[in-house]
Image (spheres, grey):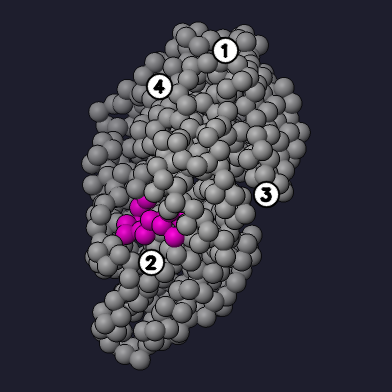
Amino acid sequence: MPTLPPKRRLAAGAALVVAALVTTTACGGGDGDGDGDGKGAGYNAALNKVANASKKAGGTLRMVGKQDLDSADPQRAYYGMSWDFMRFYTRQLVSYDTKPGKAGTKLVPDLATSTAKISDDGKTYTYTLRDGLTWEDGSKLTSKDVKYGIERLWATETITGGPGYIRQTLDPKGEYKGPYKDSSPDGLKAIETPDDKTITFKLPKRNGDFEQFLAMPAGSAVKKSKDTKAKYTQRPFSSGPYKFSEYKAGKKIVLVRNDKWKKASDPIRPALPDKIDVTISANLEENDKRLMAGDYDVDLNGTGMTQSGRVTAVQKHKDSVDNMHTSFVRYVALIHTAKPFDNVHCRKAVFYGTDFAGLQQTRGGALAAGEIANSTLPKAVPGYSDYDPYGIVERKGKPDAAKAKEELKKCGKPDGFSAKITARNNNPGEVDTAEALQAQLKKVGINVSVEQLDGADSASITGSPSVVKKRGYSMQMSGWGPDFPTGQGYAQPLFDSRFLNENGNYNESQIKDPKIDKMFDDAIAETDPAKAAEIYKKLDKRILDQADWMPFLYEKNITWRGPRLTNAYMSDAYNGRYDYVALGVKE
């Protein structure tokens, strides 16, 4: 998942944030007894644990966001914060556990009584639905509703924007025309519903991540008689504990209790607040001020506070601050088709010549911006390892100029070479980081020019190999996070040669390695997650050994946690955001 909303500006004020965080840690702010406002649960109280655990129901959860959901239609949404929010009113056969940190990535039954019963050949997945499942009008939710919701993914002329994993897996040849065009009684033949409580998926070939696909909102049930097609985003019909009371796109969302929802049928959602009230406002600094003033409890978008907001929050209200780790990785793609990066030793020279600690500092330092990255995979994705072939962690991120120059000799460029790197000028901190890298590599003879681009043009410029070649780009700086927490959900668009596209390309290094492609095939076909993770470790090792793609930072966010919030914890399933469906409020 690319970094769609801008993340944050970490420049002149970063040192203040870091200094304040260091002070916080030294003063023991995590126990709530520091010199902050005294109202929060404590610094980092929601990091891998629950802040203000409570079962008390009632009150209004007040959220604010700089941008609206990309869609309220579960089959059309692709922003991570939208997927998090949809847990209030959508349900899937399986979903993510309501537990802090990495434990939240575990798949647990939702509409179904258990996770899938998988056939010996790994191609058939069968589920039995729970008793007591209902829609907001009190009608029974059946297996046919689940099938119909998923079938909507094929109506690509109307249901646009969402992920295509289920569609590509169940119908790789694109033969089904979708529920709006198909008039046959059977619908999509790869999904069978022999009775109201049974649903079976028949895959043409094995895919060990199939249940991950079903856990996305794309796998949500939709009641056919309530499907308003393209207009469904204006008023989705609820199967969860809340239903829409008001939705003004770009302005306001109000959810109220769905009195037809039965807690006995839902082991996941505590449904504590009486109401969810969301305000959409593009004024980021004002949003931060109102969060700190208590007008709102939590940021819907979950991408961190502004520079000024961070400084104020950490210095004056640190007990309501969480320094959240995310599943996003900041990286530099080294483009294989651009000379001299067709030579592995020239690529390795960049690894050795880079001051990773300096890049980290440019983005705000270890506490504010994140850890130095050694693996291509984020820590939340099985397959991550501590493999560090360039000794980056061992040297605490510092460069090794002697080894960089050795590699330059090996690639036939003893005096160095020139390169051109792209950086998005509306993705906060990226241009500053590219310019820092430029200064670092110059010390070993690699002369890098920085070209600033509008992030909105990524698909047609840096995402187009022909444009990249025409413009002479050889390095691209960007960020990436998983669609779902597996190697396939994170890495395949980045490294699989079959994902190289002329537009919207994310295999920016333009890696064409049959051994890597085969590793993806083997891992995806593996139904044992532990065995798949071992394959992804080998894939990670190969990419690093070949210096194909250079990760440099595991990203963090400075996040506001309102003092009224209960049951607040960050979830690795939602890239370090709070698990919204678990939240409650004090009154």
- Mark 4 or 3, nearer chain start: 4
Q: Which residues are magenta?
A: 365-378
Q: Which residue is mark 1?
A: 261
- Mark 4 or 1, nearer chain start: 4
- Mark 1 or 3, nearer chain start: 1
Q: Residues within 10 Å of mark 2 (few under 14, many from 20)?
A: many
How far from the left and from the top, in percent, is residue 368?
47, 54
160 and 138: which one is in front?
138
The CA span between labels 2 and 1 is 51 Å
The CA span between labels 1 and 3 is 35 Å
Q: Residue at x 27, y 67 (%)?
A: 395
Q: Which residue is mark 2?
A: 357
In the picture, the disc for residue 284 is 3
Q: Which amino acid is tagged 3?
A: Leu
Image quadrant where one finds the C terminus = top right
Q: Is residue 512 visible?
A: yes
336 and 402: which one is in front?
402
How far from the left and from the top, in percent, is residue 39?
55, 32
Q: Which amino acid is tagged 4?
A: Pro
In the picture, the disc for residue 442 is none
Mark 4 vs mark 3: give the one in front.
Answer: 3
Q: Residue at x 31, y 44 (%)?
A: 382
